[in-house]
Image: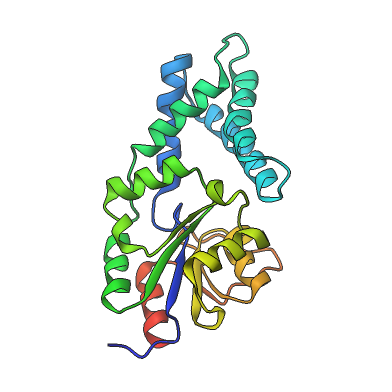
Amino acid sequence: MINKKYKWILLDLDDTLFDYSQTEYNSLQSLCVEFFGKFNEEIYKSYSLINRKYWTAFQKDELKIDDVKVGRFKELSDVNFPGIKVDPKILSERFIDYLSESTILLDGAVEFLEFLVDNDFKPSVITNGIRRNQLSRLKLSGTAKYFDQIIISEEVGFAKPRKEYFDYAKAKIGFDNDTTLIVGDNIDTDIKLGQIHGVNTCWFNIINKENHSEIKPTYEVKSFQELKSILLKS
């Protein structure tokens, strides 16, 4: 048994445990081929910009989650396939189907979760995402069993880093700020959540991004092994 500083480990899912970038790419490709008979890198880049715009608006409470789910596909269709009319609600639901069936975990993710449980840490999920998609992937991957709580922004009605999201997560999980570590890949949501609310953070930066913002994590790691080392030393 280790003498540890942290007890509660609050983990993001996408690009922290799951390889969401690859999942998203594969799912969009399947969707576009099914409904439009075409997919290429330009379509993917277009979707990425549109999707980011909608999720950023949701995180700022400028849009509701249903507006994100449907609006991004209406715009994608209008921009890239103007001659083909498909109900964006159908596109949204089918895309979530594809996402929900994909369980591409990052290398070492399961071993890291086992490490947390074996050493009496209390891991929970904190994710900005769609309930059906996130729960399905956790179940199909066999990783749901490792978590005490799973906090999904669609259920909360607010996204990280909003105070309403933080308060909801704290009430459900019951963590103490001083012995909690937030781990995630997104500076503007995961790391900002901790900075605003007084919780230490670890930036899971496996693709070696540069941080040009004023938001500074407590730690930065590029692998699960580095993260383990921090937890063992703290």
Q: Does residue 77 lie above or below 209 as drawn?
A: above
In depth, the one of 196 and 20 nearer the eye is 196
Residue found at x 55% / y 83%: 178
In depth, the one of 116 and 204 nearer the eye is 116
**Residue farthest toward the front in the current orientation of the protein:** 171
**Residue farthest toward the bottom in the current orientation of the protein:** 3
- Horizontal side, residue 224 vs residue 115: left or right: right
Is residue 20 visible to the viewer in this orientation of the structure? yes
Residue found at x 55% / y 46%: 154
In depth, the one of 200 and 15 nearer the eye is 200
Colour theme? rainbow
Q: Does residue 132 lie above or below 199 as drawn?
A: above
Q: Residue 195's spot in the image, x, y percent? A: 65, 72
Q: Residue 27's spot in the image, x, y percent? A: 42, 32
**Residue farthest toward the right in the current orientation of the protein:** 62
**Residue farthest toward the top in the current orientation of the protein:** 83
Q: Does residue 17 lie above or below 225 as drawn?
A: above
Is residue 28 visible to the viewer in this orientation of the structure? no
- Horizontal side, residue 117 vs residue 133: left or right: left
Q: Residue 83's spot in the image, x, y percent? A: 60, 8
Q: Quadrant of the N terminus?
A: bottom left
**Location of residue 55 by image quarter:** top right
Q: Does residue 29 lie above or below 203 as drawn?
A: above
Q: Quadrant of the C terminus?
A: bottom left
Q: Residue 28's spot in the image, x, y percent? A: 46, 30
- Horizontal side, residue 61 vs residue 6: left or right: right
Residue found at x 39% / y 57%: 17
Residue found at x 31% / y 66%: 113
